[in-house]
Image (tube, rainbow, N blue to C red):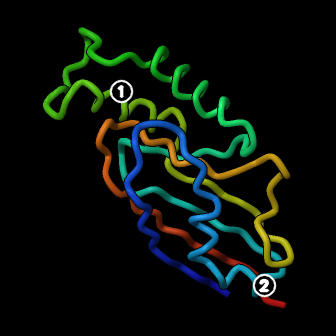
Amino acid sequence: MWIQKEIRLKPRRRGFHLISDEVLAQLPELAEISMGMMNVFIKHTSASLTINENADPSVRSDFESFFNQTVPESASYFLHTDEGSDDMPAHLKSSILGCSLNIPISDGYLNMGVWQGIYLCEHRNSGGSRNLLVTVQGQGF
């Protein structure tokens, strides 16, 4: 069984945001999969995806602080600056974290750890809504 859907996420401020529930709400078909894989691909170059802790919000704040220090805005060596001081850093952060995730599916659920969640990493000050392409391959019950 193959399923492919494009999911449009609501706009979010810059930062790291848990989107697991928003993604799952748009994929009721997962309940029909006994074993499979889900690929989530973000169709943007200034936002990224990752999986990390879903409990303590300070983790998301620490992620933002770390990446802002690691890839600072307005670095004198950036040439790509036409879209603002956050643009080139957003591209670099996106490349560091990545644009896709592969998550196993078992018995109709994402088989992640109890403390794991899917993050949208919004690297722009005004990134707008973001589009995800979700592809599921699996065996039905």
Whether residue 96 is situated above or below residue 66 in the rendered picture: below
Residue 49, image x, y percentages: 54, 47
Which element carries disc 1, helix, strand or loop? helix
Which marked residue is nearer to the observer: mark 2 or mark 1? 1
Q: Residue tagged by mark 1?
A: 89
Residue 65 percent coordinates (x, y): 53, 21
- In the figure, residue 14 lies in which quadrant? top left
Residue that label 2 marks: 139
Q: Residues within 10 Å of mark 1 (few under 14, many from 20)?
A: many
Q: Quadrant of the N terminus?
A: bottom right
Tell whether 131 sits left or right of 127.
right
Q: Residue at x 67, y 77 (%)?
A: 137
Farthest-out residue, front: 57
The x and y percentages for residue 64 are: 52, 27
Q: In this image, 111 relative to 11: left or right?
A: right
Task: Name which residue lies at 29% across and 12% down.
Answer: 75
> Horizontal placement of 15 versus 26: left or right?
left
Q: Tell me the amino acid under the disc marked 2.
A: Gln
Outermost residue to the left: 82
Mark on residue 79? none
Among the two numbered marks 2 and 1 on one chain, the one whose residue lies closer to the N terminus: 1
Dots 2, 1 in contact, CB < 8 A:
no
Amino acid type indicated by mark 1: Pro
Q: Against 96, is 122 above or below?
A: below
Question: Of all residues shown, which one is farthest toward the bottom?
Answer: 141
* Residue 58 as seen in the image, left or right of residue 88: right
Q: Is residue 105 above or below residue 12?
A: below
CA gap, disc 2 and disc 1: 40 Å
- Residue 94 found in image quarter: top left
